[in-house]
Image (spheres, rainbow, N blue to C red):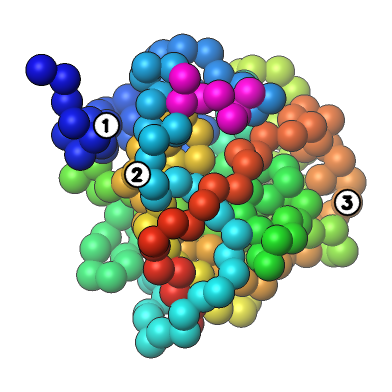
Amino acid sequence: MGMNRRQFMSAVAACPVCVAAVGGARAEGPHWSYEHADHWGEESAFKVCGIGDQQSPVDLVGAVHAQIDAPTIAWPSGDFEIVNNGHTIQVNLPPGGTVTSQGKTYDLKQFHFHTPSEHARDGKRTAMEVHFVHLNDKGSAAVIGAFLEAGGVNSVFSTVMAAAPKAEGKAKLGTSIDPAALLPKDRQFYRYEGSLTTPPCAEVVEWNVLAAPVAVAQADIDAFKAIFPMNARPLQPMNRRFLLSN
């Protein structure tokens, strides 16, 4: 007898390959591309991309104001590994960084970038978005997202793009950075339950997306787009989920 939808979704949530794929890390499985994002669900390994009802990213509109605490971050500075994994530029961090949200603590694994921004505000996307990916030992994820737009210089993003491999491969940043410098000072945020934005699209993610954008250099945005002209999944329906804002 085949699995019903609930059993199938539970199996995917527990899948270690799904967890490895959070946020764009390359995992074993069928090839996928952003150009065919609307067809991800046609692959048997990626069925949730098509049948899931808590998919990400979404348009951040119609939020319910709530008394919710912002995530508490404790991230180390350092000279980290930077990877071009064929889908994005990703910075891998050693053990030690955490985020605590809703009484649960998750370990920071990596952060990476998308262009244009994957989430939108009132239907509008910004130039880019950064995702800080955290996992816990139960297979759940917490991702903090921040919008990036042209209009200033951000030393962390400049350092990342100066070291980013232009082809698939790894390198060292070459200098110490503070990942928290990629977040806005204003910590107003949106929270909702969603999914990975890459295959297999497992619905295991608590999303916290900061409302205020971070100003970065146009030259650094252009440098990213020269490697990845577009690596953002189309917006997904909210369905019956709650979107909260503080």
Near mark 3 (Cα within 10 A), the count class, few <14, some 14-19 or many ≥20, is some
Relative to residue 198, is residue 9 drawn left or right? left
**On the image, numbered disc 3 is attached to which residue?**
218
Q: Position of residue 127 (x, y in %)?
A: 78, 52
Residue found at x 57% / y 36%: 90
Q: Give the CA distance from mark 1 to mark 3.
A: 39 Å
The quarter holding residue 154 reads bottom right
The quadrant of the picture occupied by the N terminus is: top left
Q: Give the CA distance from mark 2 to mark 3.
A: 33 Å
**On the image, numbered disc 1 is attached to which residue?**
12
| 2 vs 3, front mark | 2
Circles 1, 3 touching at the beta carbon (< 8 Å): no
In the displayed structure, would residue 67 be above or below residue 32? Answer: below
What amino acid is at disc 3? Gln
What amino acid is at disc 2? Glu
Q: Which residues are magenta?
A: 36-42
Identify the secondary structure beneath mark 2: loop
The quarter holding residue 224 reads top right
Which is more N-terminal, label 3 or label 1?
1
Q: Is residue 177 magenta?
A: no
What amino acid is at disc 1? Val
Asked whether 25 or 60 is in front, the reply is 60
In the displayed structure, would residue 168 be above or below residue 61? Answer: above
The quarter holding residue 233 reads top right
Circles 1, 2 touching at the beta carbon (< 8 Å): yes
Identify the secondary structure beneath mark 1: helix
Identify the secondary structure beneath mark 3: helix
Residue found at x 39% / y 47%: 53
Relative to residue 145, is residue 14 drawn left or right? left
Which is more N-terminal, label 3 or label 2?
2
**On the image, numbered disc 2 is attached to which residue?**
203
